[in-house]
């Protein structure tokens, strides 16, 4: 299953595990979705790819269920993760998106 979204937050759980939190719209409200990255993919995402807030990423989701006290719990984690679009850069009221300058006050494209 493929998941695409913009990073809302990154939480380091331990040396081997981190959670990437996304803010997704469900019907008429926003919800937070936390997806784990483990081991090799944690190191790749945070150290090699230098992912940060507001980066847009795409990855393959894997699900793993287990039973504990007669209840099933499902872990959701990335095994493959790719940077789709880096976070826009805001410099003194001017936003740089895909090589274009956009004024953050008016939303107009600058030359």
Image (cartoon, rainbow, N blue to C red):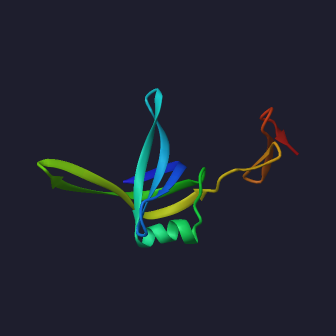
Residue reaching furthest top?
28
State which quarter of the image contains the N terminus. Answer: bottom left
Left/right placement of residue 98 relative to residue 5 reads right
In percent of the image, x 43 and y 73: which residue is there? 40
Q: Quadrant of residue 51?
A: bottom right
Q: Residue 17 versus residue 84: which sits nearer the camera? A: 17
What count of labels does the image hold?
0
Left/right placement of residue 67 relative to residue 49 reads left
In percent of the image, x 42 and y 60: which residue is there? 13
Q: Residue 44 versus residue 18: which sits nearer the camera? A: 18
Question: Residue 38, how many percent across, how many down?
Answer: 39, 66
Question: Residue 14, how many percent across, how many down?
Answer: 41, 65
Tell me: residue 74, above or below residue 107.
below
Left/right placement of residue 89 relative to residue 68 reads right
Tell me: residue 101, above or below residue 43.
above
Left/right placement of residue 82 relative to residue 102 reads left
Residue reaching furthest right?
111
In percent of the image, x 18 and y 49: which residue is there? 72
């Amino acid at each position: 299953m493929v998941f695409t979204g913009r990073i809302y937050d990154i939480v380091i759980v331990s040396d081997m595990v981190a959670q990437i939190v996304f803010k997704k719209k469900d019907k008429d409200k926003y919800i937070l979705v936390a997806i784990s990255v483990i081991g090799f993919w944690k190191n790749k995402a945070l150290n090699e790819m230098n992912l940060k807030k507001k980066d847009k990423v795409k990855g393959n989701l894997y699900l793993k269920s287990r039973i504990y006290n007669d209840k099933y719990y499902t872990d959701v984690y990335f095994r493959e993760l790719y940077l789709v679009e880096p976070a826009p850069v805001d410099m003194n009221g001017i936003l740089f998106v895909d090589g274009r300058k956009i004024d953050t006050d008016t939303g107009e494209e600058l030359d």
